[in-house]
Structures are given as C-alpha cells and as structure tokens.
C-alpha cells in the first residue's frame, strides 16, 4: 500500500476511534443526565451519528490489517491455480461492491448538502455532516480494497498466508 493511502487509512482509523469514544461520551452524558438540572434529549441522536461514523471510518483499517472475517472453507480445499482464480474473483467482487457503497453514500451526502437536509431531532443538524464521515470511510475502504485487488491481480496473496505448519485462528 502506498504511503498516502496508508496515511489516509490511519487518519480514518483515528477518526473512527474518536467517534467510538464520542458514542460512549454521549451515552454517559445521557445516563448522567439524571443528576443535571435539565434532560439531555439529543444525546441518543448524536450517539447514533457517531456510531455510524465509527463503523464506516474503521472499515479500511480493519481490511488493511486483515481483520475482516474471511471464509476460506472452499479455498483450503482446492488447488493452487483454482485458489488464485477464486481469490481474484472475490477481491474483484469486493472492489465492485465497495465502489457501489462509496458512490451511493457519497451521493447521499452530496444531495443532503445540496438540498440543505436537516435532522428531525431537537437539534436541526445538517445531515451531510454525519453522512460525510460515512462517505469518507466508504471511499477510503474502496481505495484500500482496490489496492488489494491490484496487488492480487499482480500475484500477491489475498490475505494472511499461514506459515508452514501454522493454522490461522479466528481469535488471534
């Protein structure tokens, strides 16, 4: 992965982690609201926005670190040439689906900005703000998957290859 893409993946991972901490802060704020002189009513809405942002912003880092779940039941039982063909097919399909996701989420954020769409909660937040975070995560995920697809088509392995005699475990 090139340096610029690595930095982008690292940035989105950091923003995803901050968003995840913000979810916790919103939940604690709402739970602690019983001790405040007012009721924090919009905290659950913002917790939802931060949850969506944290999920999408962490996609690329999780994929780059080979932490997404891969089902290799078929791949482990076929020959090397068939395995390479199936890996190429899988990573190409993944890139196409990631492109579709990135395109439509980016389009949604742009339309929300263009139409000045606002949330229906107590705080009329412009919807493009949380959607832009999701779009950034989806675009970064697509770029990461496309880079992996390029490498697989040029002969690299699709994921972590076990060393001789080693068995990969899901709980590593």
Image (tube, rainbow, N blue to C red):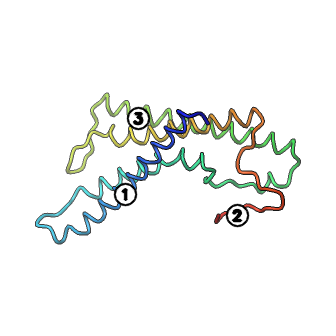
Q: Residues within 10 Å of mark 3 (few under 14, many from 20)?
A: some
Give the mark nearer the N terminus: 3 vs 1: 1
Distance between mark 3 and mark 1 Cα atoms:
25 Å
Can you tell which mark lies on residue 166?
A: none
Which SS class for mark 2? Answer: loop
Instruction: Using the image as rendered, state which of residue 169 and residue 6 is in the foreground.
Output: 6
Which SS class for mark 1? Answer: helix
Give the position of the C terminus as an image quadrant: bottom right
x and y, in percent, of residue 132 in the image: 38, 38
Q: Name the residue under label 1.
A: 21
Q: Name the residue under label 2.
A: 169
Distance between mark 2 and mark 1 Cα atoms:
29 Å
Q: Mark 3 points at which residue?
A: 108
x and y, in percent, of residue 43 in the image: 26, 57
Give the mark nearer the N terminus: 2 vs 1: 1
The picture quadrant where one finds residue 67 is bottom right
Residue 61 against residue 20 in the figure, above or below: above
Residue at 80% in and 53% down: 74
x and y, in percent, of residue 39 in the image: 17, 63
């Amino acid at each position: 992965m090139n340096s610029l893409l690595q930095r982008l993946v690292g940035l989105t991972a950091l923003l995803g982690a901050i968003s995840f901490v913000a979810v916790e802060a919103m939940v604690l704020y709402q739970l602690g609201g019983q001790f405040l002189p007012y009721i924090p009513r919009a905290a659950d809405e913002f917790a939802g926005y931060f949850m969506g942002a944290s999920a999408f912003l962490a996609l690329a880092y999780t994929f780059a670190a080979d932490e997404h779940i891969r089902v290799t039941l078929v791949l482990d039982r076929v020959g090397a040439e068939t395995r390479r063909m199936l890996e190429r097919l899988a990573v190409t399909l993944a890139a196409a689906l990631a492109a579709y996701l990135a395109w439509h989420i980016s389009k949604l954020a742009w339309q929300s900005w263009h139409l000045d769409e606002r949330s229906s909660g107590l705080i009329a937040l412009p919807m493009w703000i949380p959607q832009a975070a999701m779009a950034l995560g989806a675009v970064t995920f697509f770029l990461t998957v496309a880079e992996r697809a390029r490498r697989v088509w040029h002969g690299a392995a699709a994921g972590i290859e076990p060393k001789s005699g080693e068995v990969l475990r899901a709980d590593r």
